[in-house]
Image (cartoon, helix red, strand yellow):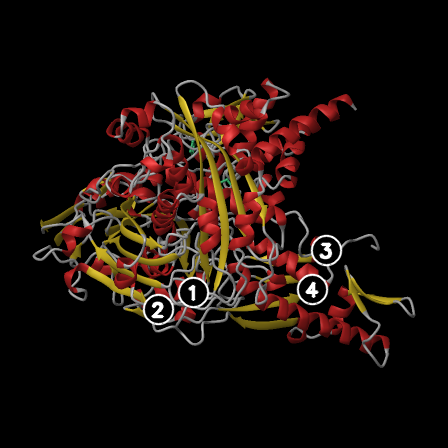
Amino acid sequence: MPIRFELNGLPTDIDCAADRRVIDLLREDLGLFGTKEGCGTGECGACTILVGGEARLACLMLAAQLAGRQVTTVEGMTHTPDGAVLAQAFVEEGAVQCGFCTPGMQMAALAMLRQNANPSREAIREGLSGNLCRCTGYVKIIAAVQRAARDISDERRA
Amino acid sequence: MTDRTPLCAGKPDLRGDATAKASGKERFAADHYPDLLLWAGAVRAGVSHARLKAVNTTDALAVPGVIRVLTCADVPGPNRHGIIHKDMPVLVDDRIRYPGDAVALVLAETREALREAVSLVRVESEALPAVFDPAAALAEGAPQLHETHPANTLMAAEIRKGDAAGALAGCDVVVAGEFSTQVQAHAFLETENGVARLAEDGSIDMVVSSQSPFRDRLEVGAALGIPFNKIRIRAPHLGGGFGGKDGATVQCLLAVAALHSAGRPVKMHWEREENLAAGYKRHACQLHYQLGARRDGTLQALICHLVYDTGAYAHLGGEVMELGMEHGGGPYRIPHVLVTGKCVFTNNPVAGAMRAFGVCQVTFAVEAMMDRLARELDLGPLELRRRNALSEGDTNCSGMRVITSTGIIGCLETLRLHPFWEQREEWKEQARPHTRRGVGLASVWNAAGYGGKVRDAAIAKVELTPEGTVVVHSAVADMGQGNSCAFMQIAGHVLGQDAAQLIVRQPDTATAYPSGSSAAGRTTYTFGNALIKACEELKARLINRAGLLFFIDSDQHLCLVPGKVVHPPSGRELSLQQIAGFMSQEDRVCISQFVAPVCDPVPDTATGFFIGFPHVIFAYGAHLARIEVDLLTGVIQVCDYLAVTDGGTVVNPVMFDQQVEGGVAQGLGYALMEEVVTREGRVLSDGLSTYLIPGAMDVPNIVSLAWQGHEATGPFGMKGVGEVAMNGPLPAVANALSDACGIHLQHAPLTPERVLMAMSAGSEEGCKGPAPPVESLGRSRASSVERPNAHTL
Ligand code: FES
Ligand code: FES
């Protein structure tokens, strides 16, 4: 079926099965490999994208659910001002190791920062609790989100 | 150009791979979808032990989009792979030895068709008696898994130093315990996957998520009878490995698929369920310990017996057990030691390499023994460890004289000064109602390198491109630990270049040189040493060629700075691109080899090991956990964690902390929640909601401190720290639990159920009243709580 939605700020028309998983649509049909698959069953968060500004799991969504929605993947995120600051914070705080969780982790963090511009460490832990990372122990990820929150609000003030 | 700063060993230079990963641009193996690809998937046996009768493919072949269903008849060559023992069939041709064995291989146009067809392949087999408990597997009359290994014994070995039995009998104090540890899954986020294609010249080109691309070439070649030069393996950045991608996972299957796909590329990507069912695992282990000391706290004798369950195939089981045995006595001076070990085949999933390779099992036992000994002797647990800790010149528990850097005392002393230790009593007193607080310690160590009888070598290649960029051809995969970033830093340091001037290529067997696996805490150490030599050679050459171009008689005043060679006395300079233009292709490449040191002479303490004994370089650490136990629910909350680590001189402080923090988190999962549950070899923990790993709410703040020594043999004085941190959390938390509640759990993981059970089995006052005085915990009690059983198997 034809589906029209906005992908990373660009109007996008596709024709695919209504029940195609969004993660397959993004990765295989549209070549956006930044959205990762770690489980396929909604347990790891590696496939997190933003739909209408909210964090969603691309492995559990079907193509038809995107109709008319605004979708942001990591590829689009880094071109938004907040997203660029967040990605830079991940780099500078050492929050990236294997990097396989990183795109999903950042998308979840971005959605959280939109709700709560100045989260405590505990709030960050809670906000990221659906995103698993096997490499970092989360210490530097939490530091990166804290730093991003600071840098984003500094930028706003400037 | 002048304000460019070269990279510098010792500085927290940013990881060269982070930006591409954070922006989603890095292409992992999983991100390869070549045009016209076919999907390949394995059909798993589903039964524990059986003789294969037939594979019925009719229904599967009838699924639209299914191209082929391959069976053992389609596998060329010996159809056996394995790192040391070639005992694992690519596709079963005779006997099924565990439910995860691959029996058939489906090729399909789509993943949907693949999935359907895999479920429709009928495996006909005749059941054989099976065995799942290592003790039962060792018993007479047990079903046998491999004719080559009688009594289901992959390896039986011992380390004997002095007269342990005699010395133990003469000890003032002896403690004993029986422990067991569970199966752990690596649970890397990127599951096993790759793509392969058969080229027109008959060679196989593979991109795979692998820790050992050069060895993969050997494994695929040997299993399928293909000449090595007809196999090219590329290993891009891995989405985690931790040992689970060391050895063939998808490689042989993919190569078989490629041979039968008429030149179309094939892609195989295990789903999480398949990863848990058929991926390699950490060995479950049963441990019997007796440790004795003199009244003054001097350790005298250790006797321990270890049984490792290696599952259906050998993989690296014998070597895993070897390393566990070598670490059986902890980083302490013990004059009399007897460690015996058996590595046993069962019809359980295959256990192989995992971070801290056999060592985290023994660390649990020996560190619990140390705490009990401290209580018996009325000595502080830190004091007892400090008194017995190894120093350079001592002989370790396997009889090896330690001559490389040995910082365990430094780590313990650093820990002693930390507020978590100094203020432990005040902190414990602040426990909330219905909770009890405890502080626990563990000394840890972990060998680096392959050990005796295996050449631990790396060959580094650096190349100056015609454009003047320096390319490091890494030959050891980067599974996320950042070795490729360390290589960039090392090359930048030696060559005086910044990140803009450098590229690190991930391993490609066509352009790099065999350098071993990314494993054993040897990746940065071994390849880094080779790389320093190669870069020094390139540096000398660039300066020399610049000197020729400047028409000067000596290289003395020339220096290499970012992007150019300068001659300060004359103010002249040449860009690296200009110099490259002057050099032939051959001249622009430098290659150098490093071979890691081995123990010489080898102590005569060990018998039964094939390879891997002994090791000469060890990372050390001292760990502390502060926990709060909920007396109503039995839940252990780890409030704070401190890890002091001796990894020699730190090349990059951020990457050092990354390794320690990640190892601690994985160790806390092992301590508290992770367990692969199986029934008759079938994995019941089939997803990340049944196999739980720590999330952001489960991991405390981790304080990582470096105790910086200098490892004279290491690149810039470093030694690997990828594994050592994994060893601390289980014993540190278990010891904190003893401190908090006076209970001594001997079976991991330390689940709330076990905590509650042990508390109700203990004395009422001991659990609910004030913490028991140390004197009340006598020897008999220390060794009698909980008996081992088969629940972990
Ligand atoms: S891949 Fe979607 S949650 Fe794991
Ligand atoms: S960085 Fe590897 S899973 Fe998070």
The reply, left or right, for residue A20 in relation to residue A99 is: left
Q: Are marks 2 and 1 in contact (CB under 8 Å)?
A: yes
The residue located at (56%, 23%) in the rendering is A111
**Mark closer to the observer (4, 2):** 2
| Chain letter behind tag 3 | B
**Residue occupied by mark 2:** B611
- The mark that comes first in sequence, 2 or 1, is 1
| Relative height, residue B156 to residue B370 (above, below) | below
**Residue occupied by mark 3:** B498
**Neighbour tally class for label 4: few under 14, some 14-19, many 20 plus, Cα within 10 Å:** many
Q: Are marks 3 and 1 in contact (CB under 8 Å)?
A: no
- Say which element carries label 1: loop
Q: Give the numbered dot on residue B494.
A: 4
**Neighbour tally class for label 1: few under 14, some 14-19, many 20 plus, Cα within 10 Å:** many
**Mark closer to the observer (3, 4):** 4
Residue found farthest to the bottom: B553
Gap in angstroms between the C-alphas marked 1 and 4: 27 Å
Q: Which residue type does callout 3 highlight?
A: Asp
Residue B389, image x, y percentages: 47, 56
Q: Which residue type does callout 4 highlight?
A: Val
- The mark that comes first in sequence, 3 or 2, is 3
Visible in this render: residue B538? yes
